[in-house]
Amino acid sequence: MADPAKVRKHAERVRELVASVVRTQIKDPRLGMITITDARITADLREATVFYTVLGDAEEQAGTAAALESAKGMLRGVVGRALGLRHSPSLAFVSDDVQEHVKHIDDLLAEAKQRDDQVQQLAAGAAYAGEAQPYKVDEDDDEGAPDDDDEDEPALRAAAQR
């Protein structure tokens, strides 16, 4: 097992190498507008998974996947020589569907905003079910005037002590 920091460093290096080779050395016409988004490598440094996105429709995505599969051997050789490992990691390419997730989240947020606006409209025209002040308040109470209860209080205390 390798050190986790070393594994992360190798994964980052694999991502950079694959992106560079795809940009400069692969001349396959099926290769579309591709972006290498991430690479992950196992702890034993034997298998690497490279994530990519392709700008375009399903046909361009399928063509890019086929081009990457056909160039897999050359990419593995370049990565193995550059990393200087005893065993070159095998490469697996996975389409990263970030754009679909972003669109789905944007749709959910738009729907939530629309529902919030509907609730706000309903709340604007709403009235209280009962009175505006649900608690009973004596309006004739004055703060400075003593209550009748205050006069009886000493007598009640004396009766309670007996």
Image (cartoon, rainbow, N blue to C red):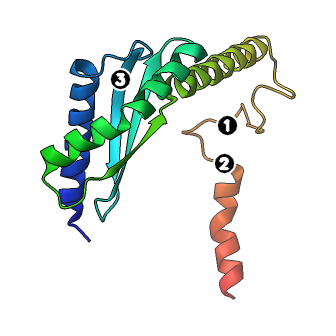
Image quarter hosting the N terminus: bottom left
- Determine whether 68 is above or below 42 in the image: above
Give the SS element for disc 3: strand
Question: Measured from the top left, where is residue 113 in percent x and y?
Answer: 64, 18
Residue at image position (78%, 15%) is 122
Image position of 70 (left or right of 17): right
Query: Looking at the image, is mark 1 or mark 3 nearer the viewer?
Result: 3
The type of residue carrying mark 1 is: Asp
Give the SS element for disc 1: loop
Residue at image position (25%, 53%) is 88
Residue at image position (40%, 12%) is 29
- Asked whether the beta carbons under mark 1 and mark 2 sit within 8 Å of each other, the answer is yes
Q: CA distance from mark 2 to mark 3?
A: 81 Å
Query: Looking at the image, is mark 2 or mark 3 nearer the viewer?
Result: 3
* Within-10-Å neighbours for mark 1: few <14, some 14–19, many 20+: few
Q: Which label number is shown at residue 154?
A: none
The type of residue carrying mark 3 is: Thr
The type of residue carrying mark 2 is: Asp
- Determine whether 80 is above or below 113 in the image: below
- Asked whether the beta carbons under mark 2 and mark 3 sit within 8 Å of each other, the answer is no
Give the SS element for disc 2: loop
Q: CA distance from mark 1 to mark 3?
A: 76 Å
Question: Measured from the top left, where is residue 46 in percent x and y?
Answer: 32, 59
- Determine whether 158 is above or below 162 in the image: above
Write down the residue under mark 3: 35
Q: Which label number is shown at residue 141?
A: 1
Looking at the image, which residue sits at the far bottom? 162
Query: Looking at the image, is mark 1 or mark 2 nearer the viewer?
Result: 1
Q: CA distance from mark 1 to mark 2?
A: 8 Å
Residue at image position (81%, 24%) is 128
